[in-house]
Image (cartoon, rainbow, N blue to C red):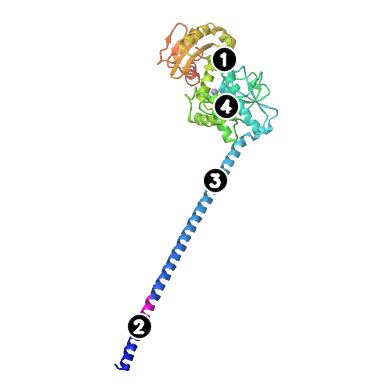
Amino acid sequence: MDFKKYLWVIIVLLACAGIGLGFYNLGKQSAEQSAEQKILDAEQKVLDAEQKIQEANQKALDADKKALDAEQKSLDEKEFNIMLNRSELENLQLVDGPIYVFGHKSPDSDTVGSSIVYADLLNQLGYDAKAAVLGKVNTETAFILKTAGVEVPEILEDAAGKNVVLMDHSDYLQSADGLKDANIISIIDHHGDGSVVTGNQLIYDARPIGGTATIVWIRARNYGLEINKQMATVLLGAILSDTSNLKSATSADRAAFEELEKIAEISDTQAFYQEMFKASISYEGMTDMEILESDIKNYESGGRSYTIGCINAYDETTASDLAERMKVLMQDLVTSRGVEMGYAQISIYHDDISINYIVPSDETAAEVLKAAFPDRVPEFDGTSYIFNPGMSRKQTLVPALTDVLAAHPGE
Ligand SMILES: [Mn+2]
């Protein structure tokens, strides 16, 4: 074999190896490049994702800031509203001497409870206010105040020359002696407007809702004031009493009830109401006249005056027994209260039972009663006119009697 021939073969082989190596290197290079690119792409993706997260975080921060701003705005608005609401009391700074806060004569749980808590609110705002009552509190109210650990307010004998806030009434007949010579500052009530007149600027807050106590609760909220456990118990009892266990409650009374029930920490409000009810019908240690006058109000219409005493009974036997006992007192009652006519309204009102035994003072009173309900013919047992279902004195009986007397003045 010729050496030159081998040389050629070697040269060719070397050339081929060189070309192969070149291709190999090229391939290797491009593989390396694409791996690098992939890494770069992945890094870019990570950066993009981070960018997105940052944007989302910023958005969340912006939203938080907006929520904070909104909260601040609503706080500012709340403060602003409280300022506006409290401004109605500014003139009280000019008043000389204490402010007496009291409800109607023959005080009930709403009248007493509203007075106690409203005086407390005025005290919280720095005014010298005192709750008072216009007579001995009834057994139900005594029970509520005892449960709350609150003292029974003192009796106000005469309002002449005093600064007064009238709660739960606006009628001279139902109010304190000397009221015509008093400085009436406010009337907070849930009845029709009565005979009280004043030339003073005043807060007159009358709302057609279940309890004056609920109006007091609304006013506390409007003034941005706290109601403590004791005051909450007093208001709760007042609302339950005036709405007959929420039977005649509006949504405001219910809202007040739900909030007060928590503050008062009374876990079983139904048991509380049962205790109140039992206390209200016990009439323990009272004479028959005290029973008849325990929840009594005078009214006037068409130039005629009359009085209605409300009594609670548990069943029909008790109701007709009470009716007999009240019947013999009716003439004395009318005379002592200086009115023309009178009624004893004995109610059985609990669970699903609602019956009234109404005892008129005389034949005229009986005729007016019958004329007031031309569409209802009550059963008459010789003593009482029996209405089944019964009715509310405030919502039904008084408006009906008032209409009849106004339509037939002085007859
Ligand atoms: Mn009331």
In space, the residues marked 1 and 4 are separated at their CA atoms by 22 Å
Tell me which amino acid carries mark 1: Ser
Question: Closer to the N terminus: mark 3 or mark 2?
Answer: 2
Residue 23 among those drawn in magenta:
yes
Could you tell me which quadrant the N terminus lies in? bottom left
Please determine whether, in this image, residue 258 is positioned above or below residue 374. Answer: below
Question: Closer to the N terminus: mark 2 or mark 1?
Answer: 2
Task: Tell me the number on the disc at residue 17.
Answer: 2
Image coordinates for residue 2, horizontal then vertical, percent: 30, 94
- For label 2, the SS is helix
Task: Tell me the number on the disc at residue 233.
Answer: 4
The reply to whether dot 2 and dot 1 touch (C-beta < 8 Å) is no
The reply to whether dot 1 and dot 3 touch (C-beta < 8 Å) is no
* Label 2 crowd bin: few (<14), some (14–19), many (20+), radius 10 Å: few
Where does label 1 land, which residue? Answer: 294
Task: Tell me the number on the disc at residue 71.
Answer: 3
Tell me which amino acid carries mark 2: Ala
Q: Is residue 78 left or right of residue 401?
A: right
Ligand 1 within 8 Å of disc 2? The answer is no
Tell me which amino acid carries mark 3: Glu
